[in-house]
Image (cartoon, rainbow, N blue to C red):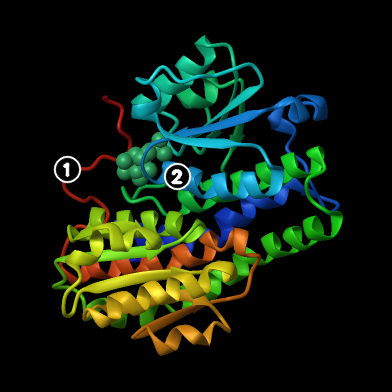
Amino acid sequence: NAAEKGGYEHFMLKEMHEQPKAVKDTLTPRIKNGDVVIEELGMTDEEIRAIRKIFIVACGSAYHTGVTSKYIFEKLARIPVEVDLASEFRYRDPILPENTLVVIVSQSGETADTLAALRLAKEKGVRTLGIVNVVGSSIAREADNVMYTWAGPEIAVATTKAYSTQLIAQYLLAMKFAKVRGTVSQNDFDAMIQSLERLPEQISLLLSHKENVQRFANRYLAAEHVFFIGRGIDYAISMEGSLKLKEISYIHSEAYAAGELKHGTISLIEDGRLVVAVLTQPELYKKTISNIQEVKTRGAFVMAVTTVGNTEVEKVADYVVYLPETNPIFANSLAIIPLQLFGYYVSIGRGLDVDKPRNLAKSVTVE
Ligand code: G6P
Protein backbone atom coordinates (compact mmCIF):
# COMPACT_ATOMS: atom_id res chain seq x y z
CA ASN A 1 0.00 0.00 0.00
CA ALA A 2 0.90 3.67 -0.34
CA ALA A 3 2.02 4.12 3.28
CA GLU A 4 4.53 1.28 3.00
CA LYS A 5 6.00 3.03 0.00
CA GLY A 6 6.45 6.23 1.98
CA GLY A 7 4.56 8.29 -0.57
CA TYR A 8 6.53 6.95 -3.53
CA GLU A 9 4.80 5.24 -6.42
CA HIS A 10 6.97 2.12 -6.20
CA PHE A 11 9.32 0.44 -3.78
CA MET A 12 12.14 0.76 -6.27
CA LEU A 13 11.75 4.54 -6.40
CA LYS A 14 11.53 4.71 -2.61
CA GLU A 15 14.61 2.56 -2.20
CA MET A 16 16.60 4.57 -4.73
CA HIS A 17 15.80 7.64 -2.64
CA GLU A 18 16.91 5.87 0.51
CA GLN A 19 20.42 5.48 -0.89
CA PRO A 20 21.96 8.61 0.65
CA LYS A 21 20.88 7.41 4.09
CA ALA A 22 21.82 3.77 3.49
CA VAL A 23 25.27 4.79 2.29
CA LYS A 24 25.73 7.07 5.27
CA ASP A 25 24.57 4.40 7.73
CA THR A 26 27.02 1.89 6.29
CA LEU A 27 29.87 4.37 6.23
CA THR A 28 29.63 6.51 9.36
CA PRO A 29 30.00 3.87 12.10
CA ARG A 30 33.22 2.69 10.45
CA ILE A 31 34.98 6.03 10.17
CA LYS A 32 36.54 7.15 13.42
CA ASN A 33 38.93 10.07 13.76
CA GLY A 34 39.77 9.97 10.10
CA ASP A 35 40.53 6.26 10.14
CA VAL A 36 38.64 3.18 8.92
CA VAL A 37 37.67 0.97 11.84
CA ILE A 38 35.99 -2.35 11.10
CA GLU A 39 35.75 -4.08 14.46
CA GLU A 40 33.62 -6.91 13.14
CA LEU A 41 36.37 -7.87 10.71
CA GLY A 42 37.94 -9.81 13.57
CA MET A 43 41.42 -9.73 12.00
CA THR A 44 44.60 -8.44 13.56
CA ASP A 45 46.91 -6.23 11.52
CA GLU A 46 49.26 -9.17 11.29
CA GLU A 47 46.53 -11.36 9.87
CA ILE A 48 45.63 -8.67 7.35
CA ARG A 49 49.26 -8.41 6.26
CA ALA A 50 49.47 -12.17 5.85
CA ILE A 51 46.62 -12.37 3.30
CA ARG A 52 48.00 -13.28 -0.14
CA LYS A 53 44.83 -13.60 -2.14
CA ILE A 54 41.21 -12.58 -1.99
CA PHE A 55 38.20 -14.20 -3.61
CA ILE A 56 34.96 -12.26 -3.85
CA VAL A 57 32.04 -14.59 -4.44
CA ALA A 58 28.43 -13.60 -5.07
CA CYS A 59 25.47 -13.67 -7.49
CA GLY A 60 23.68 -11.00 -9.52
CA SER A 61 24.22 -7.39 -8.56
CA ALA A 62 26.28 -8.42 -5.53
CA TYR A 63 28.68 -10.04 -8.00
CA HIS A 64 28.90 -6.74 -9.87
CA THR A 65 30.00 -4.97 -6.68
CA GLY A 66 32.77 -7.56 -6.47
CA VAL A 67 33.85 -6.79 -10.04
CA THR A 68 34.21 -3.14 -9.03
CA SER A 69 36.06 -3.83 -5.82
CA LYS A 70 38.59 -6.06 -7.56
CA TYR A 71 39.90 -2.93 -9.30
CA ILE A 72 39.95 -1.00 -6.04
CA PHE A 73 41.51 -3.73 -3.89
CA GLU A 74 44.25 -4.40 -6.38
CA LYS A 75 44.97 -0.71 -6.87
CA LEU A 76 44.97 0.26 -3.20
CA ALA A 77 46.12 -2.84 -1.35
CA ARG A 78 48.09 -4.61 -4.09
CA ILE A 79 46.54 -8.00 -3.34
CA PRO A 80 45.41 -10.18 -6.24
CA VAL A 81 41.64 -10.56 -6.26
CA GLU A 82 39.49 -13.06 -8.10
CA VAL A 83 35.79 -12.40 -8.48
CA ASP A 84 33.56 -15.39 -8.97
CA LEU A 85 29.93 -16.10 -9.57
CA ALA A 86 28.92 -18.37 -6.70
CA SER A 87 27.37 -20.90 -9.08
CA GLU A 88 30.71 -21.19 -10.89
CA PHE A 89 33.03 -21.07 -7.90
CA ARG A 90 31.37 -23.96 -6.13
CA TYR A 91 31.68 -26.41 -9.01
CA ARG A 92 35.17 -25.66 -10.24
CA ASP A 93 37.26 -26.99 -7.37
CA PRO A 94 38.81 -23.57 -6.70
CA ILE A 95 42.41 -23.38 -5.51
CA LEU A 96 42.33 -21.88 -2.02
CA PRO A 97 45.80 -21.77 -0.51
CA GLU A 98 46.46 -20.82 3.08
CA ASN A 99 46.30 -17.06 3.64
CA THR A 100 43.35 -16.69 1.30
CA LEU A 101 40.37 -14.59 2.32
CA VAL A 102 37.00 -15.43 0.81
CA VAL A 103 34.55 -12.53 0.84
CA ILE A 104 30.94 -13.54 0.34
CA VAL A 105 28.58 -10.72 -0.69
CA SER A 106 24.81 -11.11 -0.36
CA GLN A 107 21.89 -8.83 0.37
CA SER A 108 19.57 -11.57 1.62
CA GLY A 109 22.22 -13.83 3.11
CA GLU A 110 20.15 -16.73 1.77
CA THR A 111 21.07 -17.15 -1.89
CA ALA A 112 21.55 -20.91 -2.27
CA ASP A 113 24.64 -20.87 -4.50
CA THR A 114 26.29 -18.14 -2.43
CA LEU A 115 25.66 -20.04 0.79
CA ALA A 116 27.06 -23.21 -0.78
CA ALA A 117 30.17 -21.28 -1.88
CA LEU A 118 30.65 -20.08 1.69
CA ARG A 119 30.35 -23.61 3.02
CA LEU A 120 32.87 -24.85 0.47
CA ALA A 121 35.38 -22.18 1.48
CA LYS A 122 34.94 -23.07 5.13
CA GLU A 123 35.40 -26.75 4.37
CA LYS A 124 38.69 -25.92 2.67
CA GLY A 125 39.77 -24.19 5.85
CA VAL A 126 40.22 -20.62 4.63
CA ARG A 127 39.00 -17.50 6.38
CA THR A 128 35.58 -16.20 5.32
CA LEU A 129 33.97 -12.80 5.61
CA GLY A 130 30.31 -12.15 4.83
CA ILE A 131 29.07 -8.78 3.58
CA VAL A 132 25.39 -9.17 4.28
CA ASN A 133 22.32 -6.98 4.64
CA VAL A 134 19.88 -9.24 6.49
CA VAL A 135 20.87 -9.58 10.13
CA GLY A 136 20.89 -13.17 11.36
CA SER A 137 20.55 -14.69 7.86
CA SER A 138 22.28 -17.98 7.02
CA ILE A 139 25.38 -16.41 5.49
CA ALA A 140 25.63 -13.94 8.37
CA ARG A 141 25.48 -16.81 10.85
CA GLU A 142 27.90 -19.13 9.09
CA ALA A 143 30.67 -16.81 7.90
CA ASP A 144 33.66 -16.49 10.25
CA ASN A 145 32.99 -12.77 10.42
CA VAL A 146 30.26 -10.54 9.07
CA MET A 147 30.23 -6.94 8.01
CA TYR A 148 26.67 -5.73 7.79
CA THR A 149 25.45 -3.32 5.15
CA TRP A 150 22.93 -1.06 6.80
CA ALA A 151 20.55 -0.63 3.86
CA GLY A 152 17.43 -1.65 5.78
CA PRO A 153 14.80 -3.95 4.26
CA GLU A 154 14.75 -3.98 0.48
CA ILE A 155 11.46 -4.97 -1.17
CA ALA A 156 11.86 -4.25 -4.89
CA VAL A 157 13.30 -7.27 -6.69
CA ALA A 158 15.81 -5.09 -8.52
CA THR A 159 18.35 -4.10 -5.91
CA THR A 160 19.41 -0.48 -5.56
CA LYS A 161 20.19 0.56 -2.01
CA ALA A 162 21.64 -2.80 -0.96
CA TYR A 163 23.92 -2.67 -4.01
CA SER A 164 25.09 0.81 -3.03
CA THR A 165 25.91 -0.26 0.51
CA GLN A 166 27.78 -3.36 -0.68
CA LEU A 167 30.06 -1.04 -2.61
CA ILE A 168 30.68 1.07 0.50
CA ALA A 169 31.53 -1.94 2.65
CA GLN A 170 34.08 -3.08 0.07
CA TYR A 171 35.61 0.40 -0.32
CA LEU A 172 36.15 0.44 3.45
CA LEU A 173 37.62 -3.03 3.44
CA ALA A 174 40.06 -2.19 0.64
CA MET A 175 41.10 1.02 2.41
CA LYS A 176 41.60 -0.83 5.68
CA PHE A 177 43.81 -3.41 3.98
CA ALA A 178 45.76 -0.70 2.15
CA LYS A 179 46.37 1.24 5.34
CA VAL A 180 47.55 -1.78 7.31
CA ARG A 181 49.74 -3.03 4.49
CA GLY A 182 51.26 0.41 3.93
CA THR A 183 50.32 0.55 0.25
CA VAL A 184 48.62 3.94 0.42
CA SER A 185 50.00 7.32 1.53
CA GLN A 186 48.39 9.14 4.44
CA ASN A 187 47.51 12.06 2.14
CA ASP A 188 45.72 9.84 -0.35
CA PHE A 189 43.98 8.02 2.46
CA ASP A 190 42.74 11.28 4.01
CA ALA A 191 41.47 12.46 0.64
CA MET A 192 39.60 9.17 0.19
CA ILE A 193 37.86 9.57 3.55
CA GLN A 194 36.77 13.05 2.49
CA SER A 195 35.46 11.74 -0.83
CA LEU A 196 33.55 8.97 0.90
CA GLU A 197 31.90 11.39 3.28
CA ARG A 198 30.61 13.48 0.40
CA LEU A 199 28.94 10.58 -1.40
CA PRO A 200 25.54 10.76 0.36
CA GLU A 201 24.97 14.41 -0.56
CA GLN A 202 26.24 13.78 -4.12
CA ILE A 203 23.85 10.85 -4.54
CA SER A 204 21.00 13.11 -3.35
CA LEU A 205 21.96 15.67 -5.93
CA LEU A 206 21.84 13.09 -8.73
CA LEU A 207 18.45 11.83 -7.52
CA SER A 208 17.11 15.38 -7.54
CA HIS A 209 17.70 15.49 -11.30
CA LYS A 210 15.61 12.42 -11.96
CA GLU A 211 13.16 14.22 -14.29
CA ASN A 212 15.97 14.72 -16.82
CA VAL A 213 16.63 10.99 -16.92
CA GLN A 214 12.89 10.34 -17.18
CA ARG A 215 12.55 12.63 -20.19
CA PHE A 216 15.40 10.83 -21.88
CA ALA A 217 14.08 7.37 -20.95
CA ASN A 218 10.69 8.19 -22.44
CA ARG A 219 12.30 8.50 -25.85
CA TYR A 220 13.63 4.94 -25.62
CA LEU A 221 10.61 2.96 -24.48
CA ALA A 222 10.51 1.05 -27.76
CA ALA A 223 14.20 0.14 -27.86
CA GLU A 224 14.89 -3.50 -28.66
CA HIS A 225 18.59 -3.70 -27.85
CA VAL A 226 20.75 -1.47 -25.73
CA PHE A 227 24.51 -1.70 -25.23
CA PHE A 228 26.45 -0.41 -22.25
CA ILE A 229 30.17 0.20 -22.67
CA GLY A 230 33.01 1.20 -20.38
CA ARG A 231 36.55 0.32 -19.35
CA GLY A 232 37.88 -0.72 -15.95
CA ILE A 233 35.50 0.29 -13.17
CA ASP A 234 33.28 1.75 -15.88
CA TYR A 235 32.90 -1.73 -17.32
CA ALA A 236 31.72 -2.99 -13.91
CA ILE A 237 29.25 -0.10 -13.72
CA SER A 238 28.05 -0.97 -17.22
CA MET A 239 27.31 -4.53 -16.13
CA GLU A 240 25.05 -3.33 -13.35
CA GLY A 241 23.42 -0.63 -15.51
CA SER A 242 22.66 -3.24 -18.14
CA LEU A 243 21.25 -5.71 -15.61
CA LYS A 244 19.02 -3.02 -14.09
CA LEU A 245 17.59 -2.16 -17.49
CA LYS A 246 17.01 -5.71 -18.72
CA GLU A 247 15.54 -7.17 -15.54
CA ILE A 248 12.78 -4.58 -15.19
CA SER A 249 12.17 -3.40 -18.77
CA TYR A 250 12.59 -6.73 -20.64
CA ILE A 251 14.69 -4.92 -23.21
CA HIS A 252 17.67 -6.93 -24.34
CA SER A 253 20.79 -5.24 -23.09
CA GLU A 254 24.44 -6.15 -22.84
CA ALA A 255 27.47 -4.70 -21.17
CA TYR A 256 30.71 -4.73 -23.08
CA ALA A 257 34.22 -3.78 -22.14
CA ALA A 258 34.60 -0.87 -24.56
CA GLY A 259 37.86 -2.25 -25.91
CA GLU A 260 36.11 -5.50 -26.88
CA LEU A 261 33.52 -3.79 -29.10
CA LYS A 262 35.53 -4.37 -32.24
CA HIS A 263 35.68 -8.08 -31.49
CA GLY A 264 32.00 -8.62 -32.05
CA THR A 265 29.38 -6.28 -30.69
CA ILE A 266 30.11 -3.55 -33.17
CA SER A 267 28.38 -5.67 -35.83
CA LEU A 268 25.12 -5.11 -33.93
CA ILE A 269 25.36 -1.33 -34.10
CA GLU A 270 23.02 0.21 -36.62
CA ASP A 271 21.05 3.38 -37.15
CA GLY A 272 19.35 4.57 -33.97
CA ARG A 273 20.80 1.86 -31.69
CA LEU A 274 21.12 3.17 -28.14
CA VAL A 275 24.58 2.88 -26.61
CA VAL A 276 25.17 3.98 -23.03
CA ALA A 277 28.81 4.88 -22.44
CA VAL A 278 30.26 5.26 -18.96
CA LEU A 279 33.38 7.42 -18.54
CA THR A 280 34.41 8.09 -14.96
CA GLN A 281 38.09 7.06 -15.07
CA PRO A 282 40.16 10.00 -16.33
CA GLU A 283 43.07 7.88 -17.55
CA LEU A 284 40.63 5.99 -19.81
CA TYR A 285 38.56 8.91 -21.15
CA LYS A 286 40.39 9.15 -24.45
CA LYS A 287 40.16 5.43 -25.14
CA THR A 288 36.44 5.28 -24.49
CA ILE A 289 35.79 8.46 -26.46
CA SER A 290 37.31 6.78 -29.50
CA ASN A 291 34.98 3.81 -28.93
CA ILE A 292 32.04 6.22 -28.83
CA GLN A 293 33.24 7.63 -32.13
CA GLU A 294 33.27 4.12 -33.61
CA VAL A 295 29.63 3.46 -32.70
CA LYS A 296 28.56 6.99 -33.68
CA THR A 297 29.90 6.53 -37.21
CA ARG A 298 27.69 3.44 -37.46
CA GLY A 299 24.57 5.35 -36.51
CA ALA A 300 24.32 4.74 -32.76
CA PHE A 301 22.61 7.21 -30.45
CA VAL A 302 24.90 7.71 -27.47
CA MET A 303 24.04 8.59 -23.91
CA ALA A 304 27.20 9.21 -21.88
CA VAL A 305 27.61 9.24 -18.13
CA THR A 306 30.75 11.10 -17.15
CA THR A 307 32.31 13.37 -14.57
CA VAL A 308 31.64 17.08 -14.57
CA GLY A 309 34.30 18.91 -16.55
CA ASN A 310 34.83 16.17 -19.12
CA THR A 311 33.20 18.30 -21.82
CA GLU A 312 35.16 16.50 -24.57
CA VAL A 313 32.39 13.91 -24.46
CA GLU A 314 29.82 16.40 -25.74
CA LYS A 315 31.56 16.35 -29.12
CA VAL A 316 30.75 12.68 -29.62
CA ALA A 317 27.73 11.84 -27.43
CA ASP A 318 24.13 12.88 -28.07
CA TYR A 319 23.14 13.19 -24.44
CA VAL A 320 25.46 13.63 -21.45
CA VAL A 321 24.75 13.08 -17.76
CA TYR A 322 27.36 14.75 -15.56
CA LEU A 323 28.37 13.34 -12.20
CA PRO A 324 29.83 15.41 -9.37
CA GLU A 325 33.58 15.17 -8.85
CA THR A 326 34.79 12.32 -6.65
CA ASN A 327 37.83 10.09 -6.32
CA PRO A 328 37.54 7.91 -9.48
CA ILE A 329 37.71 4.71 -7.40
CA PHE A 330 34.34 5.63 -5.87
CA ALA A 331 32.69 6.69 -9.13
CA ASN A 332 30.47 3.62 -9.26
CA SER A 333 28.47 4.97 -6.33
CA LEU A 334 27.52 8.03 -8.40
CA ALA A 335 27.36 6.65 -11.93
CA ILE A 336 24.90 3.93 -10.98
CA ILE A 337 22.23 6.46 -9.90
CA PRO A 338 21.26 7.74 -13.39
CA LEU A 339 21.46 4.17 -14.69
CA GLN A 340 19.09 2.88 -12.00
CA LEU A 341 16.76 5.78 -12.80
CA PHE A 342 16.98 5.01 -16.50
CA GLY A 343 15.94 1.37 -15.96
CA TYR A 344 13.15 2.44 -13.64
CA TYR A 345 11.67 5.02 -16.01
CA VAL A 346 11.88 2.76 -19.04
CA SER A 347 10.08 0.04 -17.08
CA ILE A 348 7.24 2.22 -15.83
CA GLY A 349 7.02 3.97 -19.21
CA ARG A 350 6.38 0.57 -20.74
CA GLY A 351 3.68 -0.06 -18.14
CA LEU A 352 5.50 -2.94 -16.44
CA ASP A 353 5.46 -4.12 -12.85
CA VAL A 354 8.77 -2.55 -11.87
CA ASP A 355 8.85 -3.91 -8.32
CA LYS A 356 8.05 -7.49 -9.32
CA PRO A 357 9.41 -8.29 -12.75
CA ARG A 358 8.30 -11.58 -14.29
CA ASN A 359 10.24 -14.77 -13.55
CA LEU A 360 12.49 -13.16 -10.96
CA ALA A 361 12.67 -13.64 -7.21
CA LYS A 362 14.11 -11.29 -4.62
CA SER A 363 16.02 -14.08 -3.01
CA VAL A 364 17.00 -17.20 -4.97
CA THR A 365 17.01 -19.99 -2.44
CA VAL A 366 16.92 -22.78 -5.02
CA GLU A 367 19.91 -23.87 -7.07
C1 G6P B 1 18.47 -12.08 -7.12
C2 G6P B 1 18.08 -10.61 -6.98
C3 G6P B 1 19.27 -9.72 -7.27
C4 G6P B 1 20.45 -10.08 -6.37
C5 G6P B 1 20.78 -11.57 -6.48
C6 G6P B 1 21.73 -12.00 -5.38
O1 G6P B 1 18.75 -12.36 -8.46
O2 G6P B 1 17.01 -10.30 -7.87
O3 G6P B 1 18.93 -8.37 -7.05
O4 G6P B 1 21.56 -9.32 -6.72
O5 G6P B 1 19.61 -12.37 -6.31
O6 G6P B 1 21.03 -11.91 -4.16
P1 G6P B 1 21.71 -11.70 -2.76
O7 G6P B 1 20.57 -11.66 -1.78
O8 G6P B 1 22.60 -12.91 -2.54
O9 G6P B 1 22.49 -10.45 -2.80
Q: Give the residue at mark 1.
A: 359
Label 2 to label 1: alpha-carbon separation = 21 Å
Asked whether residue 3 appears in the rendered view, the answer is: no
- For residue 153, the mark is 2
Left or right, 257 with respect to 326, comes to left
Residue at image x 36%, y 42%? 60
Picture quarter with the C terminus: top left
Figure label count:
2
- How many other residues sit within 10 Å of disc 1, few (<14), some (14-19) or many (≥20)? few
Seen in the picture, residue 339 relative to 184 is either above or below; the reply is below
In this view, the residue in front, 212 or 134, is: 212
Quadrant of residue 325 in the image? bottom right
Q: Amino acid at mark 1?
A: Asn
Residue at image x 20%, y 70%? 269
In this view, the residue in front, 293 or 63, is: 293
Residue at image x 30%, y 32%? 364
Q: Amino acid at mark 2?
A: Pro
Q: Position of residue 80 (x, y in %)?
A: 60, 36
Mark before the other along the chain sequence, 2 or 1: 2
